[in-house]
């Protein structure tokens, strides 16, 4: 579900911390965000402006933590439902509920309990502990691009193979056709080969709220198309192509007040100025670093006088 950014080395894009060397770091979330709106990508991953916590995000995080705890119990039989409910209590993420009244918050909490009880009903009869959970990967996809992420859940199949699951806490389930075209699952299928040396048998999105799992065979996942998408987005990011793409997601965008597509609609004029100033300063720093490199190169080749003449 989550994608972590663990890099802190020399930037290769203005303002974007990347791994050592010249690699561009992407993830499913980053590629997906770019495809939805390049400017939102820039605000989030280049400028690193914090997003707003929300009840939906916190609720989803809490459910993920509880489910992970349950599936990683190394027990011969299914852990009781209390393990799920206790994990929900222990790992409840309250950050998105700030300012919400007690009764409303309680509704969210009870809804999460109901979802977890249903999860237990669905999976306790066939429970086998996860082979891996929240498995971190770093995938080299060529052209100095690496894709990072973590796989929610890896199951052992009856034939001894692997099945990959991503838990979804959105209300609405997707169709099989959608899941076949899932960039996220294609990335996970590639990551499985990198991590365990062979393809998974299947990949699935499990919609925990509606209690629906949509599974597709590995053969039905188009990893070539996924790689082409990643490279296309990487090219655009390297060009710093960050045009806004207004659409229905703008209503939920944390950066709407900054966005030029809504100029005059947001009150945060100073915020926009800060973002643009930060961007220009990054560009200037990158230019200055390159100028210094070129001066050294010219001086080494032609001597100090050449630089003076360039003036
Ligand atoms: S408000 Fe809309 S167009 Fe502007 S950054 Fe957000 S998603 Fe993109």
Image (cartoon, rainbow, N blue to C red):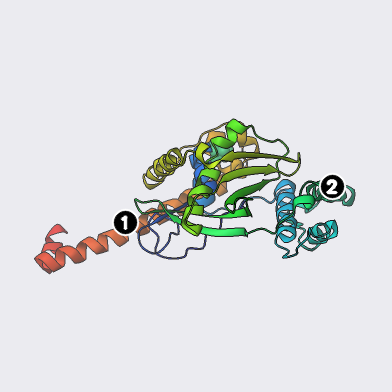
Quadrant of residue 213 in the image?
top right
* Residue 114 numbered tag: 2
284 sits to left or right of 242: left
Residue 250 place in picture, x, y as percent: 61, 36
Along the viewing direction, whichever of 139 and 55 lies nearer the viewer: 139
- How crowded is the residue under tag 2: few (<14 C-alpha within 10 Å), some, or many (20+)? some
Q: Is mark 2 within 8 Å of ligand 1?
A: no
- How crowded is the residue under tag 1: few (<14 C-alpha within 10 Å), some, or many (20+)? few
- Residue at horizontal 55%, vertical 44%? 185
SS state under label 1 = helix
Along the viewing direction, whichever of 156 and 98 lies nearer the viewer: 156
Residue 266 place in picture, x, y as percent: 61, 39
Q: Are marks 2 and 1 in contact (CB under 8 Å)?
A: no
Labels 2 and 1: the sequence-earlier one:
2
Mark 2 vs mark 1: give the one in front: 2
Above/below status of 296 relative to 270? below
SS state under label 2 = helix
Residue 209 place in picture, x, y as percent: 76, 42
176 sits to left or right of 223: right
- Residue at horizontal 70%, vertical 59%? 129
**Disc 1 designates what residue?**
287
Q: Is mark 1 within 8 Å of ligand 1?
A: no
Along the viewing direction, whichever of 304 and 286 lies nearer the viewer: 286
272 sits to left or right of 97: left
- In three-dimensional space, the C-alpha distance between marks 2 and 1, rounded to whole angstroms, equals 55 Å
Above/below status of 244 relative to 112? above
């Amino acid at each position: 579900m989550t994608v972590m950014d663990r890099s802190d080395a020399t930037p290769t894009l203005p303002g974007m911390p990347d791994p050592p060397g010249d690699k561009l770091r992407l993830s499913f979330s980053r590629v997906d965000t770019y495809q939805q709106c390049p400017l939102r990508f820039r605000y989030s991953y280049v400028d690193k402006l914090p997003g707003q916590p929300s009840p939906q995000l916190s609720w989803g995080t809490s459910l993920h933590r509880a489910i992970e705890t349950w599936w990683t119990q190394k027990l011969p039989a299914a852990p009781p439902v209390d393990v799920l409910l206790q994990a929900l209590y222990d790992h409840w993420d309250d950050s998105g509920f700030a300012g919400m009244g007690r009764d409303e918050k309680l509704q969210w909490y009870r809804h999460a309990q109901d979802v977890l009880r249903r999860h237990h009903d669905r999976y306790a009869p066939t429970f086998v502990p996860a082979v891996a959970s929240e498995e971190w990967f770093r995938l080299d996809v060529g052209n100095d691009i690496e894709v990072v992420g973590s796989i929610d859940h890896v199951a052992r199949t009856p034939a001894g193979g692997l099945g990959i699951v991503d838990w979804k806490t959105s209300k609405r389930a997707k169709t099989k056709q959608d899941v076949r075209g899932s960039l996220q699952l294609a990335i996970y299928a590639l990551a499985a080969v990198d991590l365990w040396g062979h393809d998974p048998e299947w990949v699935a999105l499990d919609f925990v709220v509606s209690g629906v799992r949509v599974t597709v065979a590995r053969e039905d996942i188009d990893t070539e198309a996924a790689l082409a998408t990643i490279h296309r987005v990487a090219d655009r990011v390297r060009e710093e192509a960050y045009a806004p793409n207004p659409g229905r997601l703008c209503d939920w965008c944390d950066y709407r007040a900054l966005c030029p597509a809504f100029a005059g609609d947001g009150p945060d004029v100073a915020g926009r100025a800060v973002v643009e100033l930060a961007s220009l300063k990054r560009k200037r720093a990158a230019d200055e670093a390159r100028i210094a490199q070129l001066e050294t190169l010219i001086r080494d080749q032609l001597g100090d006088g050449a630089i003076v003449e360039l003036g």
